[in-house]
Amino acid sequence: MSTYTYSAGPGMLPKEVMQEIQQHLLSFEHEGVSIIETSHRSESFQHVVDALEARLRRLMYIPESYALLWLQGGATLQFSMLPMNLRNRNRFAYIDTGIWSKKALEDARHFGEVNVIHPIIDETGGMSFEPSLAQDVDYLHVTLNNTIEGTRFTNIPDVDVPVIADASSNILAERIDVERFGMIYAGAQKNIGPAGLTVVIIRRDLIQSMELPSYLHYASHVDTLFNTPSTFSMYVAERVLKWVEDQGGVEAMERLNREKSERVYSFLEQSHVFTPLVSGERRSLTNIPFTTGDRDRDRNFQQFAREHGLLELGGHRSVGGLRASLYNAMPLEGAERLVDVMRAFEEETNVSHQNI
Amino acid sequence: MSTYTYSAGPGMLPKEVMQEIQQHLLSFEHEGVSIIETSHRSESFQHVVDALEARLRRLMYIPESYALLWLQGGATLQFSMLPMNLRNRNRFAYIDTGIWSKKALEDARHFGEVNVIHPIIDETGGMSFEPSLAQDVDYLHVTLNNTIEGTRFTNIPDVDVPVIADASSNILAERIDVERFGMIYAGAQKNIGPAGLTVVIIRRDLIQSMELPSYLHYASHVDTLFNTPSTFSMYVAERVLKWVEDQGGVEAMERLNREKSERVYSFLEQSHVFTPLVSGERRSLTNIPFTTGDRDRDRNFQQFAREHGLLELGGHRSVGGLRASLYNAMPLEGAERLVDVMRAFEEETNVSHQNI
C-alpha cells in the first residue's frame, strides 16, 4: 500500500527526486563527501546555485531585470523584510484574503500605515478588488493562494503601484505572469523543496540602498550568497525544478493540479457525508478544505484515512475541519486514492447509520 | 583513499550519522514518507524537537531558566535580532576580535551606540579585556571562537551586564559555561548539523515584550515553533547530538579537538615550509590558519592536498592563506592525514629546491 501525505507543508516531494537524493547523499562531488558537508563557497556548490537559478528563470519566464534571492526564515520573515525594504511613503495596501495575509499586514504595520482592502467576490465566485483603493502606497500586497482557506486570487486589475505576491503555496503549481509583479516570494516547503529556503523574485529597480542591518537588506543578497544559505534545501530544490522541467514545466503542473482538484471537488460536490468549504472560481488548485460538518466525524475520517495510508488530512490548527493539499509532487493516483477512501468512509458511515 | 574536508562550514558530519540519515531518508515515521515531507506540526516531528532540546540541555548543562530557539538566517541574522531584542539603553559593548565580530558590531550600530573594546593579549597569549569598559550598556558581545583568524577568547572577566556569545564555530567543540552568559547563539553548519539552522540559547528574563515584527521578535519563538523551521536540519542535528552524547559528550569532544589541533600545531611549529599564524593560548581548537608564506605555494599545496583527498584547505576569501577546520566530526585520522600530506609536500618541495 502506497502512503500519501496531504500535508499543507512541508509537503510531498517527487518520489524519483527523493530516491536520487538518497542515492547520492554520501557522495556529491567527491566520494564520501555529502552535499551537506560541502562549502557554499565551493565551485561545485556554485554550479548548483547557477542551475537552480537558470531552471527557475526558464520555468517561470523570469527576465534578467529581476533578481533571485535565496533566503531563510520562511515567507514569515518576508512579512517584515518586504515593508522594511520597499518603503518610501510608509503606506502600504494589503488585500485581506485570509489568515496568512492578515499575518503579513500585521507585520507591515510596524513600518507604516496599512490600507486593508477587502476582496470582491464576482458572479463566478472569482476574487478581485477595487483598484482605486491601491493608490499612493509603496506597494499592493496579495496572497495568491490561501493555504488555510483553500482559495486563490483570480483577477488582479492593473494598478499604478508595484504588486507584491506571496506565492508560497502556488509557485510552480500554476502559471504566474511574473512581469505583472514587482516581487514574488515563496517558502520552498510546498512546491520547491525542503523547508528552510525562501525564494524572493524581485524587480531590480525596486531594490533600494537603505540604512538596514545586513541580512535584512535585500541589496545584500543580490547576485551573491551573502552568508551560508540552506545549502541542502537549495540542492534538493534544483533537482525538484529539473523534475518539473522534465514533466513539461509549470503548464503541465497546472494541468495536473487542475485535474487532481477537479477529481476531489467533483466527489465532494455529490457526497452525502463530505462538504467542500469553497465554491466557484476562487477554489485553490492546491489546497482543498472540506468537512463532514461534525468535529468528531472529521477526526474519525482522519483516523480512517491514516489506516489506509493517507496522512495529514487535518485542517489548519486555527480553523479545524479537513484539508487535502495536492501540490505538484502529489500524483493523480493520490487524488484518486483520496476519493476512494472518502467513498469507503461514506459507505461505512451509511451502513452504521442504517444500523442505528 | 578516504576523503576529508577541512571546510570552515558547512563542515564534516559524523560518518555514522550520515549513513543513518541516508538509510532512513525515504522512511521517517511511515514507509515511503521522508522526514523532509513531514509536517512540522506532526507528533512525530515534535518528538524530534523534544529530543533535540533534551540532548542540547544535557550536553551543555542548560537549565530551564534558558529558552532554546530554533531559528534560520544563520548567526548573521542574529547580528540584527540581538540588538533589536535586547536594547533598553541603546548602548552595546562589542569586543573586536576579528572579521565576524566586526560584522556583528556593524549591524548593532543600526540600533544604538556601540563601544568597541579591543582585546588584551596576556603573557601566555590568551585573550581577555578590561571589564570596566563594559558598563552602562545593554550587553557585552564576544565572539568565542574566531573562525577566520583561528583564535579563541580565553578569559572573560566578570562584568555587570549580560554577556552574549557568538559560539558558531566552537559550540559543542569545547566546554562553555552557559550560566555565565545571557545568550549564546550559533549557526548549525559547523558542529551541529546542516546549514539553515541557528540555535539561540537565551536566559528567559532577557526576553522582552517589544514592538517588533513577528519573526524578528525572540518572544515569538519561545517554547513553540513559530513558523516552519528548517525541519531536515533539526532532524539531522538531533542525530548529531546523539552521536556527541555517545562519544562521551562535550568533554570528550574537547579532548579530541585538543589532540587534533596539537598534532597539527606541533607539526607546523617545526616545519621549514609551513608557518602557523596564531601563537599562544588563544589558538582555536577548531580552526588552524597557516601559510607557506607564498601565495602560489599555498595554492600549490591546496592542489597537492586535493590530489591526496584533503579538501577545502584554503583560507577565508577575505584573508587568503591556508586553513584547516577540525570540527567534532573530523576524526583524529583526519588531523594525522593532514600532517602526513604536509610532510610529503615539504619533502617534495625540498627535493625540488635541491634540484634547482
Image (cartoon, coloured by chain):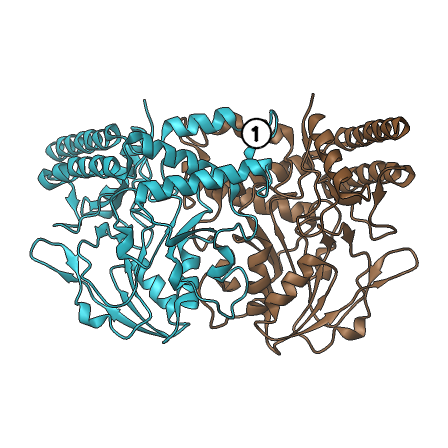
Chain colours: A brown, B cyan
- The x and y percentages for residue A188 are 60, 46
- The x and y percentages for residue B225 are 53, 50
Q: B18 left or right of B300?
A: right
Which residue is pictured at 24% across the width and 70% down the height?
A: B134
Image quadrant in which the N terminus of chain B is located: top left
Secondary structure at numbered mark 1: loop
Quarter-of-image position of residue A253: top right
- The x and y percentages for residue B208 are 44, 66
The chain that hosts pointer 1 is B
Which residue is pictured at 73% across the width and 30% down the height?
A: A305
The three-letter code of the residue at mark 1 reads Glu
Which residue is pictured at 20% across the width and 34% down the height?
A: B342
Within 10 Å of the Cα at label 1, are there few (<14), some (14-19), or many (20+) other Cα atoms? some
- Is B306 drawn above or below residue A202 in the view shown? above
- Is B333 drawn above or below residue B138 in the view shown? above
Number of on-image labels: 1
Image quadrant in which the C terminus of chain B is located: top left
- The x and y percentages for residue A278 are 83, 50
Which residue is pictured at 36% across the width and 67% down the height?
A: B106
Q: Is A201 or A191 nearer to us in this picture?
A: A191
Answer whether residue A232 is visible to the viewer in this image.
yes
Kindly identify which residue carries mark 1: B29
